[in-house]
Image (spheres, rainbow, N blue to C red):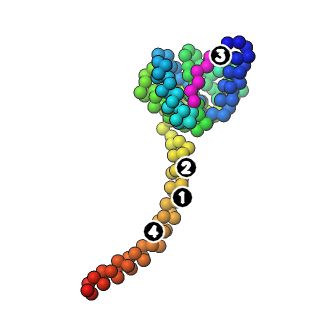
Amino acid sequence: MDRAQKEKVVEELGQIFESSGVVVVAHYEGLTVAEMQDLRAQMREAGGSVRVAKNKLAKIALEGKAVASITEYLEGMTVLAFSEDPVAAAKVMDKYAKGNEKLVILGGAMGETALDPAGVKAVAAMPSREELIAQIVSQIGAPAANIAGAIGAPASNIASILSTIEEKAA
């Protein structure tokens, strides 16, 4: 890799570190190519990405970034998982690590907040942005549905009473 290619990689990593809601660092020693492709596919489905880069280049790219706290984890064979959604990458990595002991989560960062492995698990347990939006919308819509049901109920009650009286009269 020549100097120009290294500069390009550092620039790409810098943009990733700036735009990501969460970055997770893990050791992947022993993962097969098929397992790594599976991890990448799962991450893509969740809206995130997986990147393997030289630790030295990643450390250069981290200088001055909010997620610079992950520098300490960049030793050995590391893989970076990241997503704009603050929990997507953590969820996928945590789930994959539970099913494959070769992937060991070292830690990560959410903005300026450093995460140890337990912190990554805690973030993974949080609802995603889409889940939160769905919960909020259902909470906003519930009172309106209750009001509509209450307004419609007396009319249906009157109709059933009238039909009952009609049946008894006949």
Q: Residue at x 56, y 27 (%)?
A: 50
- Going from N to C along the chain, the mark reached first, 2 or 3, is 3
Give me the C-alpha separation between circle 2 and circle 3. 39 Å
In the picture, the disc for residue 133 is 2
Residue that mark 4 sits on: 149
Q: Are marks 2 and 4 in contact (CB under 8 Å)?
A: no
| Mark 1, residue position | 140
Secondary structure beneath label 1: helix
* Residue segment shown in magenta: 49-55
Q: Which residue is mark 3?
A: 56
Q: Give the amino acid at mark 3.
A: Lys
Residue 145 seen in render: yes
**Residue 64, quarter of the rendered image:** top right
**Mark closer to the chain start, 4 or 1:** 1
Name the mark nearer the viewer: 4 or 3. 4
Q: Which mark is residue 109?
A: none
Q: Is residue 52 magenta?
A: yes
Q: Of helix, strand and loop, which one carries label 4?
A: helix
Quadrant where the N terminus sits is: top right
